[in-house]
Amino acid sequence: MNRSWRRSIVITAIMVGAIVGSAILLVYSPAVAAGKQTLTGEVGDAMCGVKHMPGEGTAAECTRTCVAHGSKYALVVGDKIYTLNTSDKAVLALLDQQAGKKATITGTVAGTDIDVSNAVAAK
């Protein structure tokens, strides 16, 4: 095998490796999977999720109690629970108002976290 032929094989192998590596990153990278989405679900808290603590009253009361004790608001969509991250006072006020009720949340989804950019009461 001459030198030019070997160099072509090496360059081709490097290019194929780069393409395969890029494809793997696109499929498995949370940063790439993250994106702005709009989801509708029930406002709860990250600690209780779907099942609220017995004796804590309604879902709304339990959610407010848990948030007051440091839990974050969450959005329950089917069997998935998304932790809602926001410091926006208007969004937090709406989440408090909608505790135990449905809300539509828009934000950047990364795994089970949503960085909330907008929240409205769902109909």
Image (spheres, grey):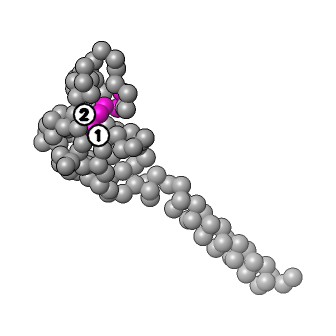
Q: Which residue matches tag 1?
A: 42
Q: Where is residue 13 in the image (x, y as percent from the top left)?
A: 71, 72
- As drawn, the label of residue 28 is none
In the image, residue 105 sits, relative to residue 42, either above or below, namely below
Part of the protein shown in magenta: 43-48
Amino acid carrying mark 2 in the image: Gly
Q: Residue at x 29, y 55 (%)?
A: 38
Amino acid carrying mark 1 in the image: Glu
Secondary structure beneath dot 1 equals: strand
Query: Which residue occupies the foreground of this view, 87 or 56?
Result: 56
In the image, residue 102 sits, relative to residue 49, either above or below, namely below
Q: Which residue matches tag 2?
A: 100
Do the residues bearing badges 2 and 1 touch, measured as CB atoms within 8 Å? yes
Q: Which of marks 2 and 1 is nearer the N terminus?
A: 1
Q: Residue at x 46, y 52 (%)?
A: 30
Q: Is residue 20 left or right of residue 45?
A: right
Quarter of the image for the N terminus: give it. bottom right
* Membership of 30 in magenta stretch: no
